[in-house]
Image (cartoon, grey):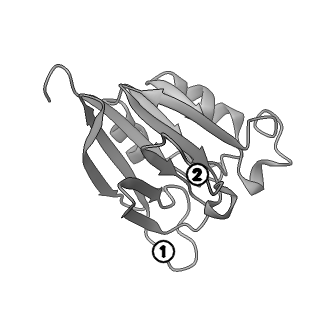
């Protein structure tokens, strides 16, 4: 990794299961993005030990103490890259002026698209495999105000 590169872990839908394989993957990242359905506040506390954490509330977090008060969406910048993050893609506004990447979860399925020059990334679920899906997350490499690499990470079911 170059000295100016910024590594960003992107996860979603842990649903109260913070796998050790996920923890290993996030430890070498400066930033961790969690796109909701966290359930346990203690999982956020642990993730914050490993990197700068941005997290949004998911639909299953509405009744969970410690996470129900998280914002439903966030706009933020990392290394000159502008992000918009929410749990459900249907909640993304129509106007995304200046946004370089949209991060969402909810479907439990990995998805990576470029639409109008903007990255749309759903890291899938890294908690319990649901709906016949796989256990996945993503890592972004940022450099010079751009996303230079998106890596899908397939995880073992180490529950």
How many circles with numbers are drawn on the protein? 2
From what the image shows, is residue 149 above or below residue 144? below
54 sits to left or right of 116: right
Residue for point 74% across, 35% down:
70
Residue for point 48% across, 61% down:
124
Element at label 1:
loop
Q: Which quadrant holds the N terminus? A: top left
On the image, the x and y values in percent for residue 132 come to 51, 80
Q: Quadrant of residue 94?
A: bottom right
Q: Quadrant of residue 143?
A: top left
On the image, the x and y values in percent for residue 50 come to 44, 24
The residue where tag 1 is placed is 133
| Residue 47 visible here | no
Of callouts 2 and 1, the N-terminal one: 2
Residue for point 42% across, 44% down:
100
22 sits to left or right of 94: left
The residue where tag 2 is placed is 14
Is 130 in front, or is 55?
Answer: 55
On the image, the x and y values in percent for residue 52 come to 48, 23
Count neighbours of disc 1 (C-alpha within 10 A) and say few if under 14, some if 14 to 19, many if 20 or more. some
Is 23 in front, or is 89?
Answer: 89
52 sits to left or right of 14: left
| Residue 124 visible here | yes
Element at label 2:
loop
Is 71 in front, or is 95?
Answer: 95
Is 59 in front, or is 103?
Answer: 103
Residue for point 65% across, 59% down:
88
Between marks 2 and 1, how big is the CA–CA gap? 13 Å
111 sits to left or right of 108: left
């Amino acid at each position: 990794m170059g000295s100016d590169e910024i590594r960003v872990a992107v996860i979603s839908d842990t649903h109260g299961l913070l796998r050790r394989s996920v923890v290993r993957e996030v430890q070498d990242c400066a930033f961790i993005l969690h796109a909701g359905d966290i359930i346990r506040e203690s999982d956020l506390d642990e993730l914050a030990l490993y990197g700068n954490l941005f997290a949004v509330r998911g639909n299953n977090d509405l009744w969970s103490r410690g996470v129900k008060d998280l914002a439903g969406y966030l706009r933020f910048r990392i290394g000159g890259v502008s992000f918009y993050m929410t749990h459900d893609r249907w909640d993304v506004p129509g106007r995304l002026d200046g946004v370089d990447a949209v991060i969402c979860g909810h479907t439990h399925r990995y998805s990576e698209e470029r639409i109008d020059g903007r990255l749309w990334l759903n890291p899938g679920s890294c908690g319990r495999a649901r709906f016949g899906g796989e256990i996945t997350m993503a890592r972004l490499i940022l450099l010079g105000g751009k996303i230079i690499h998106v890596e899908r990470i397939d995880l073992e079911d180490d529950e």
